[in-house]
Amino acid sequence: MTTLNITDYTQTLGLKAKQASAHMAKAPAAIKNKALRKLAELLRANVDALQIDNAKDIERAIVAGLAAPMVDRLKLTPKVIETCAQGCEQLAAMADVIGEIIGLREQPSGIRVGQMRVPIGVFGMIFESRPNVTIEAASLSIKSGNACILRGGSEAIDSNKALARLVQQALVESGLPETAVQLVQTTDREVVGQLIAMPQYVDVIIPRGGKGLIERISRDAKVPVIKHLDGNCHTYVDDPCDIALAVKVADNAKTNKYSPCNATESLLVARGVAGEFLPQIASIYAAKGVEMRCCPEALTLLKSYIKNMAPALIDKGLVAIDSEVFKLVPAIEADWFEEYLAPIISIKIVAGVEEAIAHINQYSSHHTDAILTRDHLHAQAFLREVDSASVMVNTSTRFADGFEYGLGAEIGISTDKFHARGPVGIEGLTSLKYVVLGQGEVRQ
């Protein structure tokens, strides 16, 4: 397309979305839920066809030399598709918050003042890699009574087109406008520049991808942006803690899946439990091929363990690894800021909960951070003082997800403080307007 054609094309997308948003805002809950259930049905009925289209994207990505974590994010496995379908059904089963009036209270004048939850209108979603985002965004848009324009990455174009066709089929068969969810059909990047500069049509932009993409959109957008830059998540192992629980959770938080933004990238360990905890978790990480970038104290402790203890444990059959498997590397300052999205983790020994909180607030991306502890006061201090969108106690950072939070799906995880924070579900795609109910009162 030429620049002129791109402008015309994007303007047409915007106009159609704006028109569709009026229909969506007044659509009955029963109709929106019907569309969501139909979409779940279509996803399950088209698993094989979706994987054929997805295979084209994966093959291109491999040929292009895309990094392994990015290729992993592209995959539309039957499990991923089923999770999308379940998300649609979970949303359909949830109460419809659109039109809900909250905080209604009578004033001395006699008027009653409250706030009504209403759709935002039109949101633009710009995302990379994960094609399942197409379904998450579409389903949340339907449930929240919005219209949306989706622009996925060129690496997932075939998968996104196939999924968008199912979304539009579900909309039409349920009596809703097919233009309520539109996928940008071209990979031309000029569309992004046009989309983020159309306040007459688009009410908010939600970028979901690499730091470069989000920084560019935040800089150039002429409409509000809901964003998160990266996911440098921490797990802090406190003194005191249940060591067995801590080992299990720290393992899951890092190795359950390396590519998501909610995987733990940095492990902080209280000095009082480091001698018992670190050798156990390091043995697990080593067996799974995880590189450990350690502070000097952690490096010394683990090297001493390998030298003195590992051979004996191997002889007893308690550790099925040898010292050469341990990938221990001295950490540098940049490691404390890093989102690896890979089998790499930074490890630091700290004095206790106060140092852990200070470290997290300095280095984290304010996404998700967890404490593993048996001390209630330490847990409460961590919850209050860690400045992140999700703060957890005795569980894995991998739970920082709209589906796991019971939101049905998520449009992304916001590390902003306005207008939404954390996993952005239905309420994050709505706004509140004041409503005033009277019986003829006049202001004196």
Image (cartoon, helix red, strand yellow):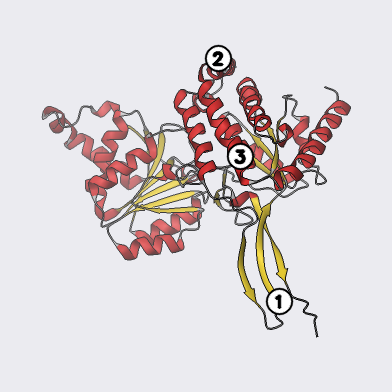
Q: Which residue is mark 2?
A: 52
Comes first in the chain, label 3 or label 1:
1
- Disc 1 crowd rating (10 Å Cα; few below 14, some 14-19, many 20+) is some
Q: Nearer the viewer, residue 304 or 99?
A: 99
Q: Which mark is residue 111?
A: 1
Q: How many marks?
A: 3
**For numbered disc 3, what is the local secondary structure?**
helix
Binning the other alpha carbons within 10 Å of mark 2 as few (below 14), some (14 to 19) or many (20 upward) gives some
Specify the quadrant of the image occupied by residue 328: top left
Residue located at (63% from left, 40% from top)? 31
Give the quarter of the image for residue 46: top right
Q: Spatial distance from mark 3 to mark 1, Cα to Cα?
A: 48 Å
| Quadrant for the C terminus in the image | bottom right
Three-letter amino acid code of the residue under disc 3: Lys
> N-terminal of the two: label 3 or label 2?
2
Residue 441 image point, x, y percent: 77, 79
Front-most of residues 167 and 396: 167
Return the residue at label 3: 211
